[in-house]
Image: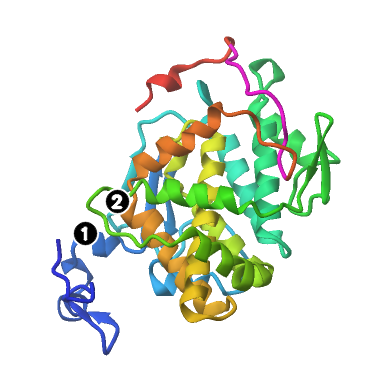
Amino acid sequence: MLGQTDDGRCVFYEADARRCRIHRLKGHASLPVACQQFPRVCLIDARGIHITLSHYCPTAAGLLFEETPLAIVCNPPGFPPDLAYEGLDARDAFPPLLRPGVLMDWETLDAFEAHAVRILDAETDSVDAALARIEALTERLRDWRATDGPLLATLEDALTAPDAPGAHGAAIMRTSGTTIDFDVDVDFDQILKLDAEVRGAVPADGVIQNAAPRAVIEAHERWVHPAWATFTRPLCRFLAAKLFANWCWYQGQGLRSLVRSLHAALAVLRVEAARQTLAQGRMLDQPLLREAFQRTDLLLVHLCSQEALARGWAAAEMAPAPGPRGRARGPAPSRDPSVHTESEHRE
């Protein structure tokens, strides 16, 4: 543990210049490993090294407000291949699970991930609508059975269908006779539940700030909700960073676990945004949202037990299919005995 000052800063942080004294005097190689990695969050699997960022870093949080195109980039110059990246090492694991007992394949995983990022990149009106489209696509994939042919073909068919939940999907989509409305209502009871689940995953010795639900609800209604849609672009970029290189791909039990993690990230962000507006007594603006991004990833990435989070989110796999507001309704899928289940024994 590095020493800390009374206000919680690292003792080697030079506040006047906003820099690290070790880095300045001794160089990057002399930093502790955790500091060398920050703000990178790495997932390593059979496909390679996948890197997203922790927005607890102020610079990373600021990048969310830029208007550069959102895309998955291979071998970017800012991430040299000779750096010793550390993170969740899944190189010896099977591909992630589609649903409990059923594996995905690498090609479908790449295609799904890329399309989900495209959905988030194209959305300009509502981050909740973009997430609803991703969730609808996951429900289609979860219905796959081995007799349907390759899983990748099922994904491609879903993306090219007239009612596909694509980057510019229709406001109303029909799936298996069920109407899906992408104009998703805000269920603040569910937001508080997801936020509490995340805070409950902080180890007992962790220090987090809890907010009174009533005060948070009032602040959200007054100062956050009216401005939320004006920040759709940075909100979508934040969700894309949560989806890519997400450890829940491997620690969860299927695509619903992953989607649940995205809902949880948005829920915590809403609560943190409400707390910022409550403290400052003003409408949500870019500085307050930037601080909320930082607070959210401090909790999600650095304070919480990732294993505990994944266990909680995996409960979504056994629940009934989500309802019609931005989601498809249907029975929970049963195990297909024709599908290999070696994933139950994967590392």
Circle 2 sits in a helix, a strand or a loop, which is it? Answer: loop
Q: Which mark is residue 33?
A: 1
Mark 2: amino acid: Glu
Depicted 47 relative to depicted 13: above or below: above
Do the CB atoms of the residues marked 1 and 2 lie less than 8 Å apart?
yes
Mark 1: amino acid: Val
Q: Which mark is residue 63?
A: none
Residue span colored magenta: 326-336
**In the foreground, 127 or 37:** 127
**In the foreground, 154 or 81:** 154
Left or right: 345 in relation to 86: right
Q: Residues within 10 Å of mark 1 (few under 14, many from 20)?
A: few
Kindly indicate the quadrant of the structure image that contains residue 4. bottom left
Identity of the residue drawn at 42% across and 20% down: 344
Left or right: 194 in relation to 228: left
Provide residue 279's location: percent of width, then percent of height.
46, 76
Provide residue 105's location: percent of width, then percent of height.
54, 30
Q: Which mark is residue 86?
A: 2
Provide residue 140's location: percent of width, then percent of height.
70, 32
Structural distance between the alpha carbons of marks 1 and 2: 9 Å
Q: Is 329 a magenta residue?
A: yes
Which quadrant of the rendered structure holds the C terminus? top left
Task: Decide which of tag 1 and tag 2 comes sooner along the chain.
Answer: 1
Q: Residues within 10 Å of mark 2 (few under 14, many from 20)?
A: some
Provide residue 301's location: percent of width, then percent of height.
37, 55
